[in-house]
Image: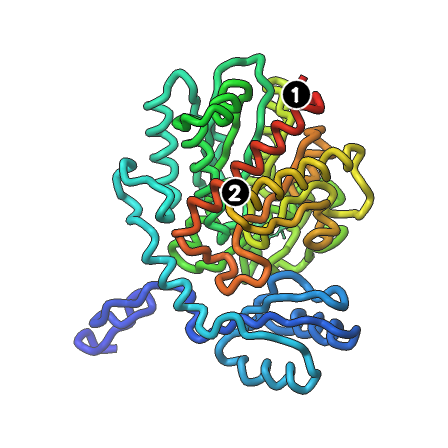
Amino acid sequence: MSASGSQIVDGASSSEVSPKDQARYDHYRIYNVQFDNEQQIELFQKLEAESDSLTFIGHAREVGQKLSILVAAHRVADFADLLATYKVQHRVLTYNFQEKIDRNMREVLPEHVDVSKYDWQHFFHLKTIYDWLDHMASKYPEQISVLDMGSSTQGNAIKGLQLGKNPANKAIFIESGIHAREWIAPATATYIINELLTSQDERVQQLANNYNWIIFPCVNPDGYRYTFEHDRMWRKNRQLFGTCRGVDLNRNYPDHWNTTGSSSDPTRYDFAGPSAGSELETQRLMSFIREHVEKDQIKTYIALHSYSQMLMFPYGYTKEHVANYDDLQEFGKKAAAAIKAESGRDYVSGNLYETIYPSSGGSMDWAHAEAGIPISYTFELRGPPDSQDLFILPAVEIQPTASEAFTAIRTIVEAAAEKNYYK
Ligand code: 0X9
Ligand code: ZN
């Protein structure tokens, strides 16, 4: 090629500004389907296995089940034809998913924004969240220490805070952001930190004084960064497997690993990994818990996710009941009632297997069964199960969502205290 001709430089023409390497979802539709018979279920199981242009939010499993599916623009005609041919009940929830993403990206403050701008009306990059953690630690040196689990697969720190300095107190552990695209989870974790440090509410102050809190807002930092830079819908970590990437870290824990509701195929959203506990992020969290569970007397483990508005306890891998099932059920119901009273939102409570879907290798099951943490929950925060936004929650909902999540945690902890779990 001649020096004056258009040259290929880094895969793009040198005379043009190259567009960013970002996944786009223009005219992608969200369908919500309902299965009325076994034939439809088989059809959709086959469809999910065959197609990488349909993003299933869950798997087709049972009659009566409703499922949201993100359909690529070029598959819309074909997909609509299938629905008609097999008489599948459905609704279109969203016609152009990219619009949701565009709106959401306008709600992000720039990465290098000053931490004084940190709030719960915007979403924030990993760097800003970490700067804010450091800022809070320097503002409240008596009550806070900065924690670092170690680095992720791609060398990002997994940072958190420990709040409360009375070593006699029992500890509550909050894990957040294991799924990259669930941005409301890290935002909720920082909201809780802020409330514990600044709230004038007596109930909150009691919780801050009577318990130590260990909070990691972003336990999948590589995935979280990737959702800002390249693909808003990324879920897993960024570990490389030949032609594709990512382990679902919430399928990677060594408790009945890869037995149900997970995949052995690295192209899938719920890939369990090549072996139990294979991922650095999983190992970091496990070592942290093992090191601290006795030392810091961690009695409560809360994992924050979205969406579907559910408060779930173990197990995920079996419908068998945990030893303290009745207590966890009672605390969950109380927490859902407290949310209803606060915001009017409906949250469903129950064991994970029956409430959302069977799934193995989740952190909560491991925390409860292997680490012996009696009060363990996985929260699915807003929106509702038939959300038009999927994981793209509007920023105006951060504050109310985080507030109701904290209300649920408070309710659970107070109810568990009455039953002497923290004695
Ligand atoms: O599938 C998941 O991992 C969770 N739902 S999400 O939409 N946030 O991805 C459900 C809970 C996971 N299961 C276990 N903890 N076992
Ligand atoms: Zn999740």
Q: Does the residue labelled 2 lie within 8 Å of ligand 1?
A: no
- Quadrant position of residue 136: top left
| Nearer the observer, 191 or 288 | 191
Task: Assess disc 1: are there few (<14), some (14-19) or many (≥20) residues with their C-alpha within 10 Å of its C-alpha.
Answer: some
Residue drawn at point x = 65 percent, y = 26 percent? 299
Residue drawn at point x = 41 percent, y = 68 percent? 98
- Quadrant position of residue 18: bottom left
Residue 4, position in %: x, y? 17, 76
Q: Is residue 23 above or below residue 322?
A: below
Report the side of 164 relative to 316 (left or right).
Answer: left
Label drawn at residue 184: none
| Residue for badge 2 | 342
Quarter of the image containing the N terminus?
bottom left
- Quadrant position of residue 126: top left
Q: What element carries label 1?
A: loop
Residue drawn at point x = 50 percent, y = 18 percent? 209
| Residue for badge 1 | 422
Q: Residue furthest right?
A: 320
Mark sitting earlier along the chain (1/2): 2
Quarter of the image containing the C terminus?
top right
| Nearer the observer, 255 or 238 | 255
Which amino acid, mark 2? Glu
